[in-house]
Amino acid sequence: MPRSLILVPGPSGQPKLLLAGPGGARAEVFLHGAQITSWIPADGRERLFLSELAEYAPGRAIRGGIPVIFPQVGGEGPLPNHGFARTQAWQPLEAEEGQAHLHLSDNDITRGLWPHTFNAELTVRLGARSLTTTLAVTNTGDTPLSFTTALHTYLRVEDVTQAQLQGLRGLRLRDMAQGDAERVEGEAEICFGDEVDRLYFNAPSRVELREGDRSTMISATGFPDLVLWNPGPIKGEKLRDLEPEGYRRMVCVEAAALGAPITLAPGQRWEGSQTLKS
């Protein structure tokens, strides 16, 4: 392992990387799933939600932070829900100040689920007020492969009923909470309270989550779509790894490629990035 990486044991002994950035900014990244579970910019306020009941065990996904969804989003395909990347052990590569690089290649487990050879790389860059997550996938095989993917970002809020997301008005969407009905978003500010589960096609490069005097800008490149999710009180109670009323303290705003799968020819590479700015 690169000597410049700071690796410490997390819950259940799961190893995690500690990143330090300008102005006292810091972040934590588990090798399990290459999952960012904490981002505290220079203002000292945690910006990611992590469930108090999150599970840290082989084969289990960590509830919160920024799970890497690959090669399938949700249950829209033959693979386990949200694919396998979020439950695999990634390997750390080189590191620089405020940056970490991890990778995942095909193995016996992944090939048993998805018969392709690939290399996935995740790069985390920490600024004083920003966190950039870049996912790159290369087809290392000799046949084409197709996948969907997302960065399933759990943003922390104090009270979801007081939060609004701006920047999606006029977009075509598929509303999974309403039987996959398709419509056009008519609201300039999207509010929360009940279940929200929507796929926005051809999303803008930047949206903004506001709550009182706090704002988080979310920008993306390479990811054409955006998924917006909050389980609401009814489904939230059924999630065993989400604490009571946990749904009130999070909103998922996910950079995604879901509307049309990404297809890579042999040797071809795809890259997508998401930047959070406080």
Image (tube, helix red, strand yellow):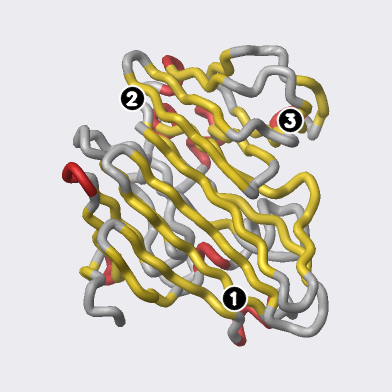
Residue shown at the point (42%, 43%) measured from the top left = 242
* Residue 27 horizontal/vertical position (percent): 28, 52
**Residue receiving disc 3:** 175
Q: CA distance from mark 3 to mark 1?
A: 32 Å
Asked if disc 3 and disc 1 are in contact, CB closer than 8 Å, the reply is no
- N-terminal of the two: label 2 or label 3? 2
Q: Is residue 175 left or right of residue 48?
A: right
**Image quarter for residue 203?**
top right
Q: Amino acid at mark 1?
A: Asn
**Residue receiving disc 1:** 119
Q: Is residue 83 left or right of residue 243?
A: right
- N-terminal of the two: label 3 or label 1? 1
Residue shown at the point (65%, 31%) measured from the top left = 204
Q: Amino acid at mark 2?
A: Glu
Residue shown at the point (48%, 59%) measured from the top left = 61
Viewer-closest of 196 and 263: 263
Q: CA distance from mark 2 to mark 1?
A: 38 Å
- Quadrant location of the C terminus in the rendered image: top left
Q: How many marks?
A: 3
Residue 266 in sight from this viewpoint: yes
Residues packed near mark 3 inside 10 Å, few (<14), some (14 to 19) or many (20 plus)? some
Q: Is residue 254 left or right of residue 173?
A: left
Viewer-closest of 208 and 196: 208
- Give the vertical position of 194 relative to 68 (above or below): above
Residues packed near mark 2 inside 10 Å, few (<14), some (14 to 19) or many (20 plus)? few
**Residue receiving disc 2:** 158
Viewer-closest of 192 and 37: 37
* Residue 97 horizontal/vertical position (percent): 25, 61
